[in-house]
Image (tube, rainbow, N blue to C red):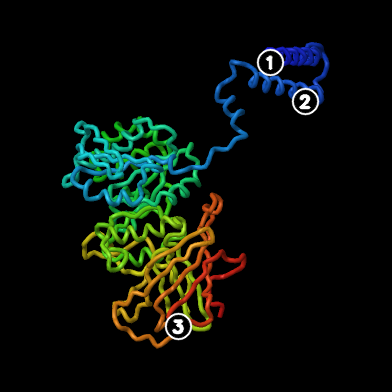
Amino acid sequence: MYQKTKRKANSFLKAIRFRYLSLSLPFVMPKPLTPSRLKALLLLLSLFLNLYLLLSPHAPQFLLTRYSSSSSSPSPTTRRHLLFAIASSSRSWTRRKPYLRLWHSPASTRAFAFLDRPADPDDDGAAPVIVSGDTSRFPYTLRGGLRSAIRVARVVKEIVDRGEADVRWYVFGDDDTVFFVDNLVKTLSKYDHDRWFYIGSNSESYMQNVKYGFDMAFGGGGFAISHSLAKVLARVFDSCLMRYGHLYGSDSRVFSCVAELGIGLTHEPGFHQVDMRGNLFGMLSAHPLAPLVSLHHLDAADPIFPNMNNTQALEHLFEAVNADPARILQQTVCYDRTHSLTVSVAWGYAIQVYDGNELLPDLLSLQKTFMPWRRSRSVEASQYMFKMRDYPRDTCKRPPIFYLESLVSNNHGIWSNYTRHNVENCSKANAIKNLEHIRVISQKLDLDVEEMKAPRRQCCNILQSSFNDSMTINIRRCRDDELISMNI
């Protein structure tokens, strides 16, 4: 079959050569070059070149690849296309493993933990441990810093040098970084993994950014590097380490080397360094209009649900994450004009019910429930990279908060239930004084890549015209011209 096709191609090429010579002869003779002759000649030359590239065994490989694959699009990115490299140490590994177990599933997620020395073997489903290589030859000159920053930074090279198959994205984080893997997959799907990308976010703290860089992906919040960039970065990384001995952290070294390759940070607001302490309610109840990708520094934060310890609270959150990862913490606001109420839903976490008309832009700003990461009296320490509003000291002046209690999901939808958290006996002489339970009905949020590139906040309705101790809310897509407002 191949020989028959080759004979036909050769016959066709001979015909083209004959036609080419017949057109070329007039150029040898003293005849004028007319536009029609030139056009015919160029068309034949173009056809001849295309046939040569397709049929010749000596055609450049990259051209053959381009022609053969142009009609096929790459398969969707999945969890297995991500390879996580987690920086840890022998001192913190045992204590921090519960964070890893929240999001790492050996059956669907690939991850390795890099330690300074071997850890006790166990079979608890944690990531396999790799002992980092020797870094004694690299300089570290910052007085008061931690030399381990070099070892942690060099994880970027060591994970790539393993040569794991079918990796589209290398993801880096600390042992106390909690990833929301399905949301990370969705987020990275917006980008071409064959191009050079360095994706993450800076700190929430203005002071931390001033000190370490506004354009750097902070390592605790996690960052992702496309496989194409990671392979080049691994080849040159040791030379970069020789130049940046004066820097403090591992993420500063990675950023500096990526910058030397000419690549800047692609900012994704779902990565959270969480450079703050105490009560994170203000941050979690007004999450950006982007999937939640990571949380960090949870050891320094209060449990995110009342009457639970940190581990229990995160496990409770992951019950909602596992049911609808894309919707977790997504803020939806609806209004009850009859009773003059404003309801702000941070799905899978908490609901606040305000007496009166609260404008949406005001509710998108964060309530200052947390404390600065750096314990300092300076003004810069309490400045952040987002707009904030006051959180009343008087608990009776705060809106009632309803925390997630339980949820049920099936093919017809998801029913999440929230229960009122009473801190003090505050008398409320309004429509919600007896309100104790809120049920939220929603469909699983499954955005495609194009919707991810231009997300829109969803709308909600309070289904009852009157309520006493319970309220039901339905979350849905907004109509084209629908405004999220009281419609006064």
Residue under numbered circle 1: 1
**Residue 49, image quadrant:** top right
Q: Tell me, yes or no, if residue 30 can be seen here.
A: yes
Is 114 drawn above or below residue 323 in the view shown?
above
Identify the mark at residue 363; answer none if there is no mark. Answer: none
Residue under numbered circle 3: 468
Residue type, mark 3 in image: Asn
Q: Residue at x 36, y 64 (%)?
A: 283
Q: CA distance from mark 2 to mark 1?
A: 35 Å
Label 1 with label 3: CB-CB less than 8 Å? no
The residue at the far bottom in this view is 429
Q: Residues within 10 Å of mark 2 (few under 14, many from 20)?
A: few
Q: Kindly state the secondary structure of the residue where label 3 is placed.
A: loop
Q: Tell me, yes or no, if residue 372 can be seen here.
A: no
Q: Name the side, left or right, on which 442 lies relative to 281.
A: right
**Which mark is first along the chain, 3 or 1?**
1
**Which mark is first along the chain, 1 or 2?**
1
Identify the mark at residue 39; answer none if there is no mark. Answer: 2
Q: Name the side, left or right, on which 484 lies relative to 1.
A: left
Q: Residue at x 31, y 49 (%)?
A: 101
Considering the image in quadrants, where does the N terminus appear? Answer: top right
Residue type, mark 1 in image: Met
Q: Name the side, left or right, on which 312 lies relative to 35.
A: left
Q: CA distance from mark 3 to mark 2?
A: 83 Å
All told, the count of numbered labels is 3
The residue at the far left in this view is 144
Considering the image in quadrants, where does the C terminus appear? Answer: bottom right
Q: Residues within 10 Å of mark 1 (few under 14, many from 20)?
A: few
Q: Residues within 10 Å of mark 3 (few under 14, many from 20)?
A: few
Mark 2 or mark 1, whichever is nearer to me: 1
Q: Position of residue 206 (x, y in %)?
A: 32, 58
